[in-house]
Amino acid sequence: QSFCSRLPKVELHAHLNGSFSEKTLYSLYMDSPGCKTEDIRYLISSFHQGSDRTLDDCFKNFDIAHAVTISPAAVRRGTMDVISEFASDGVIYLELRTTPRTVPGVMSKKQYIQAVVDAIRDVPNFIGPERFIIVKLLLSVNRRDERSEAEANIKEAVEAHMAYPDIVVGVDLSGDPKCGTVAENILPLFADARSKGLKVALHCAEVPNEKEVEAIIRFKADRIGHGTCIHPQYGGSEKLWTLLLESKVPIEVCLTSNIKCKTVENYESHHLQHLLPVHHPIAISTDDKGVFCTTLSKEFEIAAETFLLSFGDLCRFTEMAIDASFASPDEKNQLLEKLNNFKVLEG
Ligand code: 5GP
């Protein structure tokens, strides 16, 4: 086992339907008579496309995952697989995020959320006695959807948070950044969720958009996803970069996702190069470990090799992610203790 596999890690940016491994998708497909053969052919070819994928191709992959998770049982099984795989990779704290979905006549948004929550509540029974993982859930708004859908998802999130305050801890804005609503129009919905006790994580600056990015940074989300086109080198500006640094809002950094979606050219030129020297809080994350064929350990390894990081730097990454997480103070202490024990063991 490599150092990065052994290191206790914290995953803060993982979309449920993008995290299904090939194995999980096949097994869900076999149990899903409504799924068309052409879809699965596309799935097979897309898994082998590797770096030739574009952002648009990646978004097609989500449609495939959605096609095989059209019942609460499938959603629950898929969630259990994803949690088990993260736990096997040495992840001790996981925040999953997902967009509540309705399948007419089969599954309501509430049942969808319940299926994910049920899997999370069952964690101690299926990860095995030798493993440890705390799992939380964020509910997403897809910017492609109508405003009414965004309102419905936020309402579901608030209700789910009231029912399961220790599990449903936040809301997220995601979806194809090149289409749909401008974030500034729906930020008041997120402010409302925040006033009801939910934390807010917003995808931001995946493509250049000065006005929207400024509105999101000024909103002071609890965390920002990607944050690529903020620095002037990536179509942002000095003004946005300064605003970000002053805000101290942690950035969820998804190296492989950004390369495979071609929003960043290569690892060496990733915007992490600008965040590290100024000690801006970050959390190394997978985004969609199934779609991008990665693991959190691999992402740590890539960061370490690309930016010549030390044992101490990588432990510090876990520490920063614990700090940026939506865990309770007690849970954060528990996670820090695991990290400190590891440091002692590894010398
Ligand atoms: P789900 O919410 O269905 O569990 O996970 C898949 C969804 O997550 C996609 O349909 C998309 O809305 C969102 N998503 C996954 N990866 C990305 C990403 O890199 N950027 C953005 N903006 N959204 C993403």
Image (spheres, rainbow, N blue to C red):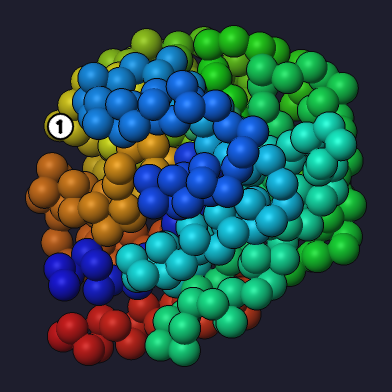
- Looking at the image, which is closer to me, 171 or 77? 77
| Residue 237 in picture, x, y percent from top left | 41, 14
| Residue 18 in picture, x, y percent from top left | 48, 40
| Residue 171 in picture, x, y percent from top left | 70, 43
Relative to 300, does residue 70 appear above or below in the rendering?
above
Q: Is residue 289 visible?
A: no
Q: Is the N terminus in the top left, top right, bottom left or bottom right quadrant? A: bottom left
- Looking at the image, which is closer to me, 90 or 200? 90
| Pointer 1 local density, CA inside 10 Å: few below 14, some 14–19, many at least 20 | some
Q: Is the C terminus in the top left, top right, bottom left or bottom right quadrant? A: bottom left
Relative to 35, does residue 344 appear above or below in the rendering?
below
| Disc 1: which residue | 268
- Name the residue at 48% across, 27% down: 37
Q: Residue 213 sits in which quadrant?
A: top right
Q: Is residue 346 visible?
A: yes
Q: Is residue 129 left or right of residue 162?
A: left
Q: Residue 254 sits in which quadrant?
A: top left
- Disc 1 on helix, strand or loop? helix
| Residue 25 in picture, x, y percent from top left | 46, 45
What amino acid is at disc 1?
Glu
- Name the residue at 78% across, 57% down: 114
